Amino acid sequence: MRSGGNKNGKCNGNISSQDQKCAGNSSSGKGCLKVIGLGPGDECLLAPQARVAIEKADAVVGYTGYVKLIPQELLEGREVLSTGMMAEVERCRKAVETALSGRDVVMVCSGDPGIYAMAGLVMELLEAGGLFGKVGFEVIPGIPAFSAAAALLGAPLMHDFASVSLSDLLTPWEKIEKRLEAAAGADFVIAIYNPRSKKRAGHLSEAITILRKYREGSTPVGIVNKAYREGQKVQVLL
């Protein structure tokens, strides 16, 4: 793996070797699809390379709530294709189809696009359709939610840690329980994503029951809501 950058310290949109897959696509009539991470939500934490990708895009695709995190001036002059929650496959297909039409597209995700986000699903659709050679493709990283939350809490991830999502939409709850057991038993600091929803009201309490078997009652717990967004809340419970 090589690192990128330039001597001027400015982002020119061609930092990574992957980006060459999208270079020159407009002149060849081939579209480009970039899956980008917006970070935790604050404009100041939008990575320069992701910003450049939006500026170069013809169309922006994403969940409505995430599209709202993009500065309005970056959306001007670009087609915006958004969907509500629970429409991930539809959203990814829209992005792929738009890129196949010869346009440059960004699929936006919160945090990092490869962590509980859309990069994997987009790649599955491209592979299933044999489309990797027909559109340019790139994944552009962003600041993940656990990094943003950790910064607000201090430095809880200084050593080995594990990340576990409590969403059983794609992973059976029995497997999630095993992952919690393994992570807690190995004494990892654990970052928990998707702690609860209307349909999963009891999963968090079940997870806490598992963790209590391996943690003392004095173990600190950090809770972060809406990191670096309006309504942010940070709590540390001892």
Image (cartoon, rainbow, N blue to C red):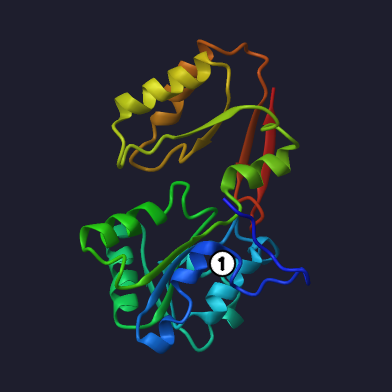
- The quadrant holding residue 111 is bottom right
x and y percentages locating residue 200 in the rendered image = 36, 37
Above or below, 12 against 69 in this view is: below
The residue lying furthest to the front in this view is 2
Above or below, 61 against 171 in this view is: below
- The quadrant holding residue 60 is bottom left
x and y percentages locating residue 103 in the rendered image = 38, 82
Whether residue 214 is visible, yes or no, is: yes
Whether residue 118 is visible, yes or no, is: no
x and y percentages locating residue 158 in the rendered image = 70, 31
In the displayed structure, does residue 32 sit left or right of residue 76?
left
**Closer to the camera in the image, 39 or 23:** 23
Residue at 30% over, 60% down: 87
The residue lying furthest to the right in this view is 8
Count the marks: 1
**Closer to the camera in the image, 215 or 130:** 130
**Closer to the camera in the image, 216 or 129:** 129
**Closer to the camera in the image, 98 or 61:** 98
Q: Mark 1 points at which residue?
A: 69
Amino acid type, label 1: Leu
In the displayed structure, does residue 113 sit left or right of residue 45?
left
Helix, strand or loop at mark 1: loop
Disc 1 crowd rating (10 Å Cα; few below 14, some 14-19, many 20+) is: some
Residue at 21% over, 63% down: 129
Residue at 37% over, 43% down: 198
Quadrant occupied by the C terminus: top right
In the displayed structure, does residue 112 sit left or right of residue 122?
right
Residue at 33% over, 37% down: 168
x and y percentages locating residue 136 in the rendered image = 39, 71
